[in-house]
Image (cartoon, grey):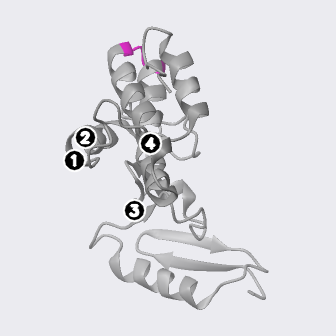
Amino acid sequence: MLAQDITVPIGPIRTALPRHTVLTGADFVVLRILQENLGRRPIAWSVTTGRDFLGLDRYLVQQGLVFRLLPAVPDTTDPNLDVHRVLGLPLDVRTTARLAFETYRYAGLLRPGVQAEALEPTAAGVAGNLSLPLAQLAYAYQARGEPDQALRAAEWAGQLSPNPALRRALIQLVGEGGVQDSR
């Protein structure tokens, strides 16, 4: 536990860790890796790793399945960033769409008739994680007045997710004529 507030330099960033912060050995390793690599290599946390970013939250942008650390606070007026997302961090819409629609492979989960909730629990969890960026894209596109893109993202997210509540929310978002809930 820290006895006093400290400021940790990480490249051009200065992060403040308040007094009484509990740091584990892993936290010291992460801080050192960040110090050595910010600006040299891309740094990102998976969306599945939790939410302890050592005070660096305001420097993070979600890109697909990761939270990417930037060397400066992101420009929230950038039209490519959607700042009203579920996870509380700006969503890089362009990069997330490229990753979700062109890069990620879904191992047949998008084939007609495949039901994510019928998967064994670990696979269903992975499918649910894969649906998250697509669901966020659906909301971002809907807010931007891009219904065709919202529908595409919502359909993919609804197909991947083992969560019927998410499918219902997506149906409501894009309208009854959109995402089909055949389950």
Label 1 sits on what residue type? Thr
Q: Position of residue 134 (x, y in %)?
A: 40, 37
Query: Mark 3 near mark 1, Cβ–Cβ under 8 Å?
Result: no
**Element marked by disc 4:** helix
Nearest to viewer (mark 3 / mark 1): 1
Q: Label 3 belongs to which residue?
A: 71
Give the dominant element type of the magenta stretch: helix, strand or loop.
loop
Tell me, for residue 116, which label it has, or none.
4
Highlighted magenta segment, given as a residue range: 143-147
What amino acid does circle 3 point to? Pro
Mark sitting on residue 98: 2
In the image shown, does 119 or 59 lie closer to the viewer?
119
**Which residue matches tag 1?**
103
Q: Secondary structure at mark 1?
A: helix
Residue 18 percent location from the top left of the image: 73, 74
The residue sitting at 47% across, 51% down in the picture is 124
Mark toward the viewer: 4 or 1:
4
Q: Quadrant of the N terminus?
A: bottom right
Q: Residues within 10 Å of mark 2 (few under 14, many from 20)?
A: few
- Earlier sequence position, callout 2 versus callout 1: 2
